[in-house]
Amino acid sequence: MPAGGTPADEAFVRFDGVTLDYTHDGRAVRAVEDVSLTVRRGEFVVIAGPSGCGKTTLLKTAAGLVRPTRGEVHVGATPVTGPLKIVGMAFQNPILLPWRRTLDNVLLPLEIVAPYRERYRRDHAVYAGRARELLAAVGLAGFEDRFPWQISGGQQQRASLCRALIHQPELLLLDEPFGALDAFTREDLWQVLQALWMERRFTVILVTHDLREAIFLADTVYVMSARPGRLVSRTPVDLPRPRTLEDSFSAAFTATYHAVRRLVGEGRA
Amino acid sequence: MRGLRGAVREWLPPAAVIVAALVAWEVGVRALRVPDYILPGPVATWQAIWQWHRAIWFNAAQTLYTTLVGFALALAGGMALGLAIGYSTLVYRALYPLLVAFNSVPKVAIVPVLVIWFGIGTVPAIATAFLISFFPIVVNVATGLATLEPEWQDVLRSLGASRWDIFRKIGIPRSLPYFFASMKVAVTLAFVGAVIAETVASNRGIGYLMLSASARFEVPLVFAGLVVVALMGVVLFAAFSIVERRLTGWAYRGQVGVGV
């Protein structure tokens, strides 16, 4: 159960027997095999697994960037056949546009997603205000007018988080967003993300190969096996929130860590 | 900010090289007693520039005019065709070999054809300037678009952006550095094209001036023409370099403040 236990016990995202093949050098390669799982509204789900296990591909099926070969993904009541406007996504690299200042990078989704795009010019001041609030929430107040190449990698990733959230998506998809950062910055951003999530209670699916990160952030950790990616386990994490870095060295945290770590080992065998 | 010392350090080496080259040229010509009708020295060339400055100015203005008109047409046409080609990978792949083939044709070989079509005068010079600078712009703009990072496209696609959105929001800004990089190369090419066309088929312009001077063995005047052509090329290149830095500074982030 998520802390507070407020969200209804309703399936918001549903993966039904998702299998994904792609062709490489003319041969069919199976990236993901028969993955079924449900995510409740407001739940923080982490999918962990070794590199190349197809977890990113799985996430892209929920984003509508990739169609499953077999099976279906539902978000809300709709089957995903293309990108949805209630979804925000952040990637392993921040991928900010270098010719836009930080504020304008964060505002980008509002220039694209309906209904914001129709009102973009008229309500620009409102949107800019919202972007500034969001930037301040992740510790980037005062950096709004910097270009991406004038801020650090960690700051870029913070801005990228803001960009994923600016259109107030109900579902946030995070593809190893902290993977390219140093350990200190990464742990900072865990707390930033947790704070944002506790305040706004969007639904999150985060993909990572870092188990400490998984357990720190998740309500539920799913472990995937090496390629072809299959779900090997589901572990609820019942640690109280907000979790602190100190908590990540507690006995309960460590016990969960070891339990999940063993499952990853079995998945590889 | 760079101070006076920075400016000196930046401008001193090229200035020193130019002065040294001029001195060596003059000394060499005098020591070896080379006659002016073979190779005039810098002093004789300068005297020719001074003596003929009205004619040079008149013809240089004509060359500048044909260059810039041809170049402007190439900019507009090259940007438009480049964007159209880059918009679709299929069109890009289909047209690219043809463009490279066109670009490989020596433009001087086309000038006689242009004379048949347009007669002698301003139009062949403009057309040659256009033809010679058009293809580099097309190829650069199209390449800028066709090599769009898939990750950037994913960011926009995950928001449900249409192809047109992607083209507007990242395609065009991304191709601008390529466009400006090709621009400063293309402007010197346009200049070369105009001078070539004037040499073959005109009664005005720096190219014509040099041709008629060499026909009269006025070699110092030929060299005066060459110097003016070189100076105009440098000025145009520098002008468009400044425009480029101003408009696509983000693409030069490693070297901000270096100047032209």
Image: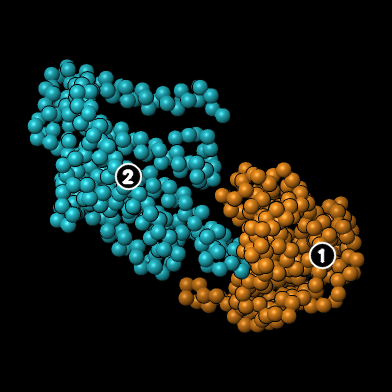
Chain colours: A orange, B cyan
- Which amino acid lies under the numbered mark 2 shown in the image of this protein? Leu
The quadrant of the rendering that contains the N terminus of chain B is: top right
Residue holding disc 2: B68
Residue at the location (38% across, 54% down)?
A: B76
Binning the other alpha carbons within 10 Å of mark 2 as few (below 14), some (14 to 19) or many (20 upward) gives many
Foreground residue among A260 and B202 = B202
Foreground residue among A178 and B96 = B96
Foreground residue among A70 and A81 = A81
- Regarding residue B55, the answer to whether it shows in the image is yes
Q: Secondary structure at mark 1?
A: loop
Q: Are marks 2 and 1 on the same chain?
A: no
Q: Secondary structure at mark 2?
A: helix
- Which amino acid lies under the numbered mark 1 shown in the image of this protein? Arg
**Vertical relation: B79 (above or below) B68:** below
Quarter of image, res B243:
top left
Residue holding disc 1: A201
**Vertical relation: A78 (above or below) B78:** below
Labels 2, 1: front one: 2
**Vertical relation: B246 (above or below) A194:** above
Q: Mark 2 — on which chain does it sit?
A: B
Question: Does residue A14 appear left or right of residue B29 in this picture?
Answer: right
Residue at the location (13% across, 33% down)?
A: B213
Question: Does residue A199 appear left or right of residue B90 in this picture?
Answer: right
Residue A31 position, x and y percent, is: 61, 73
- Regarding residue A160, the answer to whether it shows in the image is no
Residue B238 position, x and y percent, is: 39, 37
Residue at the location (86% across, 63% down)?
A: A255
